């Protein structure tokens, strides 16, 4: 079990270590000789906040039709996370496909909703090719890679909410 969790913990630690984005700009130093770096912090986006909330529920058991921290199904998990941000979403993976706007795979951002297997499964993209989801009976909320065989071969697309 520890071996299976290790990659997920590494992703989680990386995400928590850099919650905001820093952008370097150039400015002149006091004496005007050398450029002095200026760091501008950007506020977290709604997607960043969704990821932060979603990762709090790692290890929560899958429960068919579940939409609470005592147990989630895939769409109930997405609905719950976005509900914590004041965004009402349907408790149906196929109905979620009609929310927000389409996003191409190469434009994915944290918080985007990713869809698989004919729209029968959803998760929340966390970045770096990974997503958090509540997979199936007998499993728990976890982070998986879009590159894993089943997810790569059944990927349907993504939507951005808000």
Image (cartoon, rainbow, N blue to C red):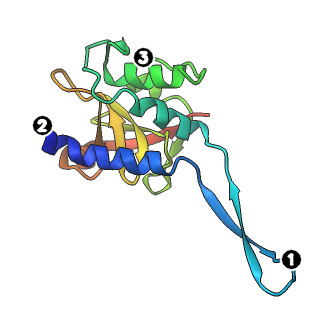
In the image, residue 12 above or below residue 24: above
Mark 1 secondary-structure assignment: loop
Mark 2 secondary-structure assignment: loop
Mark 3 secondary-structure assignment: loop
Query: Which numbered circle lies on residue 91?
Result: 3
- Say whether residue 45 is left or right of residue 25: left
Of the residues under marks 1 and 2, which one precedes in the sequence?
Answer: 2
Residue 112, position as x, y percentages in the image: 48, 40
- Please say whether residue 101 is visible from this viewpoint: no
Residue that carries the numbered disc 1 in the rendered image: 30
Of the residues under marks 3 and 1, which one precedes in the sequence?
Answer: 1
Residue farthest right in this picture:
31
- Say whether residue 88 is left or right of residue 114: right
Quadrant of residue 84 in the image? top right
Is there a contact, CB below 8 Å, between mark 3 and mark 1?
no
In the image, residue 92 above or below residue 122: above
- Please say whether residue 141 is visible from this viewpoint: yes
Q: In this rendering, which labeled residue sits more in front, label 1 or label 2?
A: 1
Query: Which numbered circle lies on residue 1?
Result: 2
Q: Nearer the viewer, residue 3 or 30?
A: 30
- Say whether residue 85 is left or right of residue 144: right
Is there a contact, CB below 8 Å, between mark 3 and mark 2?
no
Residue 83, position as x, y percentages in the image: 53, 19
């Amino acid at each position: 079990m520890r071996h299976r969790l290790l990659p997920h913990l590494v992703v989680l630690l990386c995400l928590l270590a850099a919650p905001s984005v820093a952008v370097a700009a150039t400015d002149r130093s006091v004496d005007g000789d050398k450029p002095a770096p200026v760091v501008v912090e950007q506020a977290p986006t709604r997607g960043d906040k969704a990821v932060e909330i979603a990762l709090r529920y790692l290890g929560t058991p899958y429960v068919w039709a579940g939409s609470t921290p005592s147990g989630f199904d895939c769409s109930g998990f997405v609905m719950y996370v976005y509900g914590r941000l004041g965004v009402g979403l349907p408790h149906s993976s196929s109905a979620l496909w009609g929310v927000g706007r389409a996003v191409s795979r190469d434009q994915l951002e944290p918080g985007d909703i990713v869809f698989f297997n004919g729209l029968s499964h959803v998760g929340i993209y966390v970045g770096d090719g990974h997503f958090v989801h509540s997979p199936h009976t007998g499993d728990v909320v976890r982070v998986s890679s879009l590159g894993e065989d089943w997810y790569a071969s059944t990927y349907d697309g993504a939507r951005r909410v808000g």
